[in-house]
Image (cartoon, rainbow, N blue to C red):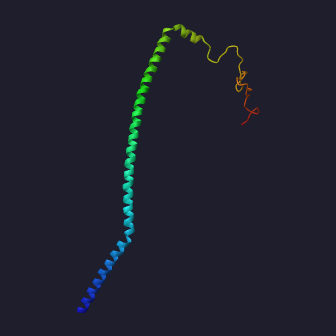
């Protein structure tokens, strides 16, 4: 029985030794992983600092833009008020002068010259070019396409 107990304790000691060697092997093999984890943590801290500084800069620029927008909108409101006042004044002047309305209704439409020859579509009127260039004729093909 002594021999069995001795063999048992030798087995327990060898098992404990193997477990210790296994733990050491795991620790040695995890060193590169631990180094990578530390590097990643440092990168995360650096990126967090960079993001905070960029966000601060963006918030400052956004405030500047908002201030400029507020100023521009107030200037636009003043200009719209002035334009409304001008249109109201023009409307009052037109209402006050009925003769001007009558003349405006008797006038021929813009671009109508009464005795002028009618120019077919695609041709330009015979007016000399101030630059001395010849007028360009129709660009439509003389051969009409027949899609039948």
Q: How many marks?
A: 0
Q: Quadrant of residue 21?
A: bottom left
Looking at the image, can residue 47 be seen? yes
Q: Quadrant of residue 111?
A: top right
Q: Quadrant of residue 133?
A: top right
Looking at the image, can residue 1 be seen? no
Quick check: 122 left or right of 78? Answer: right
Q: Residue at x 38, y 56 (%)?
A: 44
Q: Residue at x 51, y 8 (%)?
A: 97
Residue 67, percent from left and from top: 39, 34
Determine the residue located farthest toward the right in the rendered image.
143
User: In the rendered image of this protein, does residue 115 appear above or below residue 54?
Assistant: above
Instruction: Give whichever of 105, 42 is nearer the camera.
Output: 42
Residue 20, percent from left and from top: 31, 77
Q: Residue at x 31, y 81 (%)?
A: 17
User: In the rendered image of this protein, does residue 11 appear above or below residue 71?
Assistant: below
**Quadrant into which the N terminus falls:** bottom left
Residue 79, percent from left and from top: 44, 23
Residue 145, percent from left and from top: 73, 35
Instruction: Give whichever of 107, 25 is nearer the camera.
Output: 25
Instruction: Give whichever of 131, 116 is nearer the camera.
Output: 131
Quick check: 141 left or right of 40? Answer: right
Quick check: 64 left or right of 112? Answer: left
């Amino acid at each position: 029985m002594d021999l069995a107990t001795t063999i048992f304790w030798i087995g327990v000691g060898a098992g404990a030794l193997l477990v210790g060697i296994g733990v050491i092997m795991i620790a040695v093999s995890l060193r590169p992983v631990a180094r990578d984890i530390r590097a990643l943590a440092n990168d995360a801290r650096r990126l967090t600092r960079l993001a905070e500084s960029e966000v601060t800069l963006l918030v400052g620029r956004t405030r500047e833009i908002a201030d400029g927008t507020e100023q521009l909108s107030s200037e636009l409101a003043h200009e719209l008020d002035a334009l409304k006042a001008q249109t109201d004044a023009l409307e009052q002047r037109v209402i006050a002068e009925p003769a001007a309305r009558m003349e405006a209704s008797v006038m021929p439409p813009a671009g109508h010259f009464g005795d002028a020859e009618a120019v077919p579509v695609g041709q330009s009127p015979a007016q000399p070019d101030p630059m001395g260039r010849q007028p360009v004729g129709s660009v439509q093909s003389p051969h009409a396409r027949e899609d039948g």
